[in-house]
Amino acid sequence: MRDFSKARRVVVKVGSSTLTHESGLLNIRRVEQLVKVLADIENSGRQVVLVSSGAMAVGVGKLGLHEKPADMPGKQAVAAIGQCELMYIYDKHFSEYNHVTSQVLLTRDVVDDPMRKRNVQNTFERLLGLGTIPIVNENDTVCTEEIEHAATFGDNDTLSATVAELAGADLLVILSDIDGLYDGDPRENPGAKLLHEVDEITPEIEACAAGAGSARGTGGMITKLHAAGLATAAGIDMVIMNGAQPKKLYDLFENAEIGTYFPAAK
């Protein structure tokens, strides 16, 4: 049975498909709503870490491009421009609620090296202790693997699970463009049923997650299952829920049966 009343440190991951319109441009209203809710959750006494995709999508929009560049230097340049703009937007909106943001850009080698990993853990602890809201992304300008999603974190779902462990989180919430994990593809099968709780990630559960993500993101449901495996193994509860209405995060913390819940391993 889900009970998030004691979850004091929460990592929230939001993807490109949630942050942007079908056009690929930033969904300003949704960003504003998300920031307002996260600021209020922070005000309630919880500590919030935001793992945010969207740098490349924002960069494409900022430059007026019709699509992502095909070459790696172009992708990295667009990500650099987009990350700057994305942080400006977050900082501007969070400051309206008297919250200070901080930026953390990670690469896989930091996590794989014990000393660097400890440094990152210490940094998260200090940033949260100072009352800031860390905003995390993979460092696309120096790490090509995330862009190609062939190695390292590969996607921000996996990154968010890693961040949840590094930050000592009690709960990881992944905001998606669908309501959670279904027993079939709800876009193709209207009769597919939402799975409210998954206690174990079996081959049958993995089969339910087949299919790629949207054109605006790098992940899909299978990467979210991978993140669930990492998070729950680290003793962290995880929920996949629809990010279209950020206010539903309030309902989540009131233990409403929203999304798909993956309880932490005992």
Image: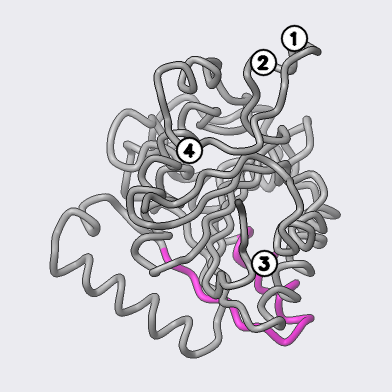
Vertical order, 221 against 27 (above or below): above
- Asked if marks 2 and 1 touch (Cβ < 8 Å), the reply is yes
Q: Earlier in the sequence, mark 2 or mark 3?
A: 3
Q: CA distance from mark 2 to mark 1?
A: 6 Å
Identity of the amino acid at label 3? Tyr
Which residue position is annotated with label 1?
Answer: 189
Q: Nearer the viewer, mark 3 or mark 1?
A: 1
> What number of labels is visible?
4
Helix, strand or loop at label 4? It is loop
Image position of 223 with respect to 127: above or below: above
Who is closer to the viewer here, 118 or 254? Answer: 254
Query: Which badge, 1 or 4, is on the more N-terminal residue?
Result: 1
Query: Which residue, as the protein is rendered here, is positioned at the far front?
Result: 1
- Whether residue 74 appears in magenta in the rendering, the answer is no
Q: Disc 2 or disc 3, which is closer to the eye? A: 2
Going by the numbered disc 2, the residue's amino acid type is Asp
Residue placed most toward the observer, 60 or 172: 172
In this view, the residue in front, 147 or 109, is 109
Q: Which mark is residue 199?
A: 4
Helix, strand or loop at label 1? It is loop
Residues in magenta?
85-104
On residue 185, which mark appears?
2
